[in-house]
Image (cartoon, rainbow, N blue to C red):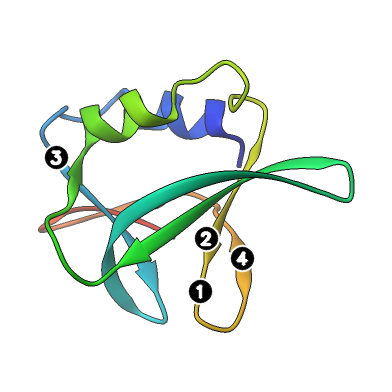
Amino acid sequence: MRVLDLLQLLSDHNKNTPVRVKIAGALQNLATFELQIVDEQRQLWIHSQLTGKPLKVWEVMLLLDKPEWRQAYVYVIEPDDIRPLFGFQEITSGLALN
């Protein structure tokens, strides 16, 4: 999934909905975003954190909406690996990126 695709999907949801990322079956808060070039492919890496409060949809959209990031593929950094982001699911406490 590209950043542009994620932004489009998020635009259909309530702007105050919390967004978290699912890592090893557990929900974690979004911490930072990092643009990388791997094998000539632009990748946006999402780093998570256990502490703090979750970002809202409008905050995620504001942070991700940079022209140089729009065509980058989105990846989630896990403790032992990096995996591509394929979408999200609606859960009772908001949205879970996975």
Between the C-alphas of marks 2 and 4, the distance is 5 Å
**Three-letter code for the amino acid on which mark 1 is drawn:** Glu
Residue beneath label 2, please? 76
Instruction: Report helix, strand or loop for mark 3.
Output: loop
Instruction: Please name the residue shown 23% across and 72% down the image.
Output: 50
Q: Which residue is mark 4?
A: 83
Q: CA distance from mark 3 to mark 4?
A: 24 Å
Q: Amino acid at mark 2?
A: Val
Residue 23 at what x, y percent from top left?
A: 40, 73
| Marks 2 and 3, how far apart at CA | 20 Å
| Local SS, label 1 | loop
Q: Is residue 42 above or below residue 95?
A: above
**First reached walking from the N terminus: tag 3 or tag 4:** 3
Q: Which mark is residue 78?
A: 1
Q: Nearer the viewer, residue 45 or 58?
A: 45
Crowdedness near tag 3: few (<14), some (14–19) or many (≥20) residues, C-alpha within 10 Å:
some
Q: Residue at x 42, y 81 (%)?
A: 24
Q: Nearer the viewer, mark 3 or mark 1?
A: 1
Q: Secondary structure at mark 4?
A: strand
Query: Mark 4 touching mark 1, by CB under 8 A?
Result: yes
Q: Is disc 1 in contact with disc 2, using a CB cutoff of under 8 Å?
A: yes
Q: Is residue 35 above or below residue 15?
A: below
Distance between the Cα atoms at labels 1 and 2? 6 Å
In the image: residue 79, left or right of residue 30: right
Picture residue at 36% right of the left edge, 30% below the top? 63
Which disc number belongs to residue 38? none
Q: CA distance from mark 3 to mark 1?
A: 23 Å
Amino acid type, label 3: Thr
Amino acid type at circle 4 is Arg
For disc 4, the neighbor class at 10 Å (few under 14, some 14 to 19, many from 20) is some
Residue 4: x and y, percent?
55, 25
- Image quarter where the N terminus lies is top right
